[in-house]
Structures are given as structure tokens and as C-alpha cells.
């Protein structure tokens, strides 16, 4: 595998009473000896198409056909919400230059992602996109996502973009986007019916805009495929996602940890943190019935950038409520290195120890210092070291967290693929708009 996984400092014998004991791990394994056998038999009728990487690979031909139709275009505006865009941004940021909060540049081509409902932002997109060589790409599994439709209308109805070609990505033949495509002849890329939105980063949802930027999408799928057998094995000793899921579950249910931080020591992975937040928040934040009692479960995720967050959130993590589990992510090989620091000028001689050091060495030392300070407070943490930022590594990283979520769904007896509370808020918003005059 291309990622090094270290869960040592989640254990009681490493950090003290707040860690997980070997007896608790043994009891959990005895209670759930074959979680992956159970998942793959799928008595829950969960949408598990995200594991069918052969099917996703077969869809590459559809993606390539769609890309061929727009090969003379240089701006792609992808419009979506949540899982329809977060995976795209997470992966694009590791490959090309991020030129704005939601824009990415690769040579003469630019990807602009519209993933919120804000008039000023959408107006800026219209201005930046210009009038020539623009393609609009609305993405919605249901085809009826309110914010996506609203932004698509706002963009496509502007005179400058009215004639721009459209590539629709949707999974509902009866949805508004599919209807639009049939009536206008716009090509349609599938959102597979057995792939949930936040599990769609390895589907045409992200593969199409990534391919537009020249991202090696085949390599991305190959990396996930190579890791799949290890990440879906019922082996509590060697399967890293099973090991993480077991320890997070015990820390939450036996030690009352309720928050999960991901410290990211690589700016190119900041957008990955947003994808990770949605995966954990929507998948695990659920109500369930235990006997006659309603129980609320979940870990509140927070992705932060190190070392910057050491100057804002570390104080809370160390001295605030002891309810936070920390994960740390760093990259072993950076893509480009600056020269080592030279001898400090006069006046800052106390920093002589930095002579000969690279910035990434300093950041790595800060990561280890932060982890150690948490350990001294008996606060649990784990470490992921990515070999590099190649697509194969990112494919493994995505599947690692997705498989961990699936196992935690088994442990918690919840459905990690739904978001019923979100649906209610959407229905109430639609009702307000339908009942009030424009």
C-alpha cells in the first residue's frame, strides 16, 4: 500500500486511560468478527457501487467521449452541491494550481466550481468565465437539487453564456436535469444509482471535470483498486480502515469522545479536508432507536491546516474539553522543494538551528511536536503518511476513509448512506419559495 498507517497513539498502553485497551478491541472483534462479510452480503440494501471499481473503470469510455466533444473548450464550470463537487475539488487541488477558492488552472484550461448559493460569487463566475470556450456542467444525482438548478439557471440565462454547451451529470431519468438534457440534446453522464453522492469521487461526477484538467483518472481508479482487497478484508490486524473504525468506535462509545479533528500538513490537501468532513458528518450523524429511546450518534469532524491551526485551535484541543480525537496527515515526498535555509542574518542568531533545514522539515517537526503535546495530555491521535500526491495514492486515501465509514455503520447499527434530516430542510425551503410571491 502507498500510505503508512500508524494507530499506536490511540491505545491505552501508549497514552493512558483515555486510550483504547486491548481487551476492548478483542471484545469488539468477538462481537463483529466479519464486518466486511456482513457488508458485502448487504442485508441492509446499502448502495455499494462505490466498491465496484470495475464498473467505474468501464464508465471511463463515457467520460472520454464527453471530453472529446468539448476538446476545443478551455473553461469548464461545474455546478453542484456537497458530494457533487467536494471530491472534484479535493482531487483537483492535489494536481493543478488552485487559482481561487473554487477554481483550478491547468495550462490554458480552467475548472470553476460553483458549489454554494451566493449572488456575488455566481456573478464573479460569470465575469471570470468570459464568453468564449465555456462549458456548463450541472451535477446532481437526483437532478432536482434546488441550489444546483438555481445556479445553473443563473449562469445559463446570462446572454454571455446562453449558447455555451452543457454536459449534464445525473442519475435520475425523471429529474429536471435529465428532462433538460432530453429536450436540448445535451449529453448526459451517469451518477450510478448504487453510488451515494458523498461516495462518488471515483465516478463520472468527478472523473469528467478532472479529465478536463488532464488529471490521470485511470491511475486514480487503479490506486483504489489496488488497495481494495486490503481495505475490505476481515482482518483486525492488517486492514487499516478496519483498525481505524474499531478504535474510533470504541473511543466514541467507551470514552465519550465526540469530535474528530484532521490536521493536514500539506496545503494541496486542504480541499480534501472539506470532502472528509462531509463524509464523516453526513454518514455518521444519525438518530436511531434503542428500545424505546431515541439515541443520537456521530463524531463532529473538523479539518484544519497545520502548522497554521497550531496558532488558533491547538489551545482548545489541549486545554479545552477532552473530547477530541486527532488524525494527522502529511506527505513524505513533496513535489517541489526550495533550497535549504542559509545562515540567519544578524539579529536572529537564536535561529541558527534552522540553517540547512527545508521548510517541510520544520513543518514535520511541528507535526510531531503537536502530536506529542496531545499525547502528554492523554489525548488520542493517529498518523497517515502519504507516499506522495500521485493519483494512485489519492485513490487509496479516498477508499480508506470510505471503507472505514462503512464499518462504523455496522458497529453503530445505522445507515451511513442517507441524510434524512437534510431532506427535511430542503422540503421546507421549497415550500417557502412556492408559497411566497417572487
Image: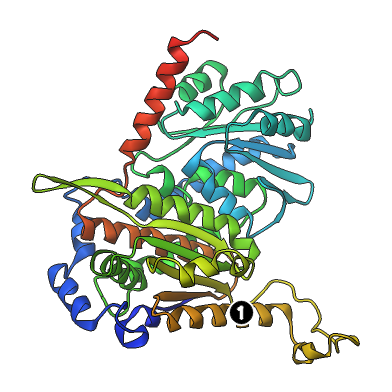
In the visual, does 88 lie left or right of 58?
Answer: right
Q: Name the residue under label 1.
A: 366
Observer able to see residue 318: yes
In the visual, does 69 lie left or right of 400?
Answer: right
Mark 1 lies on a secondary structure that is helix
Are there few (<14), some (14-19), or many (20+) residues within 10 Å of tag 1?
some
The residue depicted at 52 percent of the width and 35 percent of the height is 139
Q: Where is residue 416 in the image (x, y as percent from the top left)?
A: 30, 49
- The colour mode here is rainbow
Find the residue positioned furthest to the left: 291
Q: Where is residue 127 in the image (x, y as percent from the top left)?
A: 78, 31
In the visual, does 424 lie left or right of 207?
Answer: left
The residue depicted at 59 percent of the width and 70 percent of the height is 310
Observer able to see residue 1: no
Q: Quadrant of the C terminus?
A: top right
Residue 167, located in which quarter of the rendered image? Answer: top right
Q: Where is residue 259 in the image (x, y as percent from the top left)?
A: 39, 61
Find the residue positioned furthest to the right: 346
Residue 154 against residue 406 in the figure, above or below: above
The residue depicted at 85 percent of the width and 86 percent of the height is 344
Q: In which quarter of the image is the N terminus?
A: bottom left
Residue 175 against residue 233 in the figure, above or below: above
Residue 262 against residue 437 in the figure, above or below: below
Residue sitting nearer the eye, 431 or 401: 431
Residue sitting nearer the eye, 10 or 35: 10
Q: Where is residue 318 in the image (x, y as percent from the top left)?
A: 48, 72
Find the residue positioned furthest to the top: 437
Residue sitting nearer the eye, 157 or 341: 341
The residue depicted at 18 percent of the width and 71 percent of the height is 28
Amino acid at each position: 500500500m502507498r500510505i503508512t498507517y500508524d494507530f499506536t497513539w490511540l491505545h491505552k498502553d501508549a497514552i493512558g486511560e483515555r486510550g483504547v485497551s486491548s481487551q476492548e478491541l478483542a471484545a469488539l472483534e468477538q462481537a463483529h468478527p466479519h464486518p466486511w462479510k456482513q457488508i458485502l452480503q448487504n442485508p441492509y440494501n446499502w448502495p455499494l457501487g462505490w466498491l465496484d471499481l470495475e464498473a467505474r473503470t468501464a464508465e471511463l469510455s463515457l467520460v472520454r467521449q464527453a471530453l472529446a466533444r468539448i476538446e476545443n473548450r478551455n473553461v469548464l464550470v461545474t455546478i453542484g452541491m456537497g458530494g457533487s463537487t467536494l471530491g472534484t475539488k479535493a482531487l483537483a487541488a492535489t494536481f493543478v494550481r488552485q487559482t481561487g477558492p473554487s477554481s483550478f488552472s491547468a495550462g490554458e484550461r480552467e475548472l470553476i466550481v460553483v458549489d454554494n448559493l451566493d449572488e456575488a460569487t455566481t456573478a464573479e463566475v460569470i465575469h471570470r468565465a468570459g464568453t468564449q470556450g465555456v462549458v456548463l456542467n450541472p451535477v446532481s444525482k437526483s437532478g432536482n437539487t434546488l441550489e444546483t438548478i438555481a445556479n445553473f439557471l443563473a449562469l445559463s440565462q446570462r446572454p454571455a453564456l446562453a449558447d455555451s454547451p452543457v454536459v449534464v451529470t445525473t442519475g435520475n431519468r425523471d429529474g429536471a436535469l435529465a428532462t433538460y438534457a432530453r429536450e436540448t440534446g445535451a449529453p448526459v453522464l451517469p451518477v450510478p444509482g448504487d453510488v451515494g453522492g458523498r461516495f462518488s469521487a471515483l465516478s463520472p461526477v468527478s472523473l469528467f471535470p478532472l479529465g478536463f484538467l488532464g488529471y490521470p483518472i485511470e491511475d486514480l481508479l487503479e490506486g483504489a483498486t489496488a488497495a481494495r482487497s486490503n481495505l475490505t478484508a476481515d482482518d483486525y490486524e492488517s486492514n487499516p480502515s478496519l483498525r481505524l473504525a474499531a478504535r474510533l468506535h470504541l473511543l466514541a462509545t467507551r470514552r465519550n469522545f465526540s469530535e474528530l479533528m484532521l490536521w493536514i500538513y500539506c496545503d494541496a490537501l486542504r480541499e480534501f479536508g472539506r470532502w472528509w468532513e462531509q463524509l464523516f458528518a453526513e454518514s455518521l450523524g444519525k438518530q436511531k432507536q434503542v428500545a424505546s429511546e431515541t439515541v443520537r450518534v456521530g463524531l463532529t469532524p473538523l479539518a484544519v491546516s497545520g502548522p497554521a491551526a497550531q496558532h488558533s485551535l491547538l489551545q482548545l484541543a489541549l486545554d479545552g474539553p477532552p473530547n477530541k480525537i486527532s488524525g494527522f496527515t502529511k506527505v513524505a515526498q513533496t513535489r517541489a522543494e526550495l533550497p535549504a535555509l542559509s545562515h540567519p542574518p544578524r539579529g536572529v542568531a537564536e535561529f541558527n538551528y534552522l540553517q540547512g533545514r527545508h521548510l517541510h522539515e520544520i513543518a514535520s517537526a511541528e507535526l510531531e511536536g503537536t502530536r506529542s503535546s496531545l499525547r502528554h495530555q492523554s489525548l488520542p491521535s493517529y498518523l497517515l503518511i502519504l507516499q506522495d500526491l500521485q493519483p494512485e495514492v489519492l485513490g487509496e486515501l479516498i477508499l480508506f476513509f470510505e471503507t472505514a465509514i462503512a464499518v462504523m455503520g455496522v458497529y453503530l447499527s445505522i445507515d451511513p448512506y442517507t441524510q434524512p434530516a437534510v431532506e427535511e430542510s430542503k422540503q421546507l425551503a421549497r415550500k417557502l419559495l412556492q408559497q411566497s410571491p417572487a
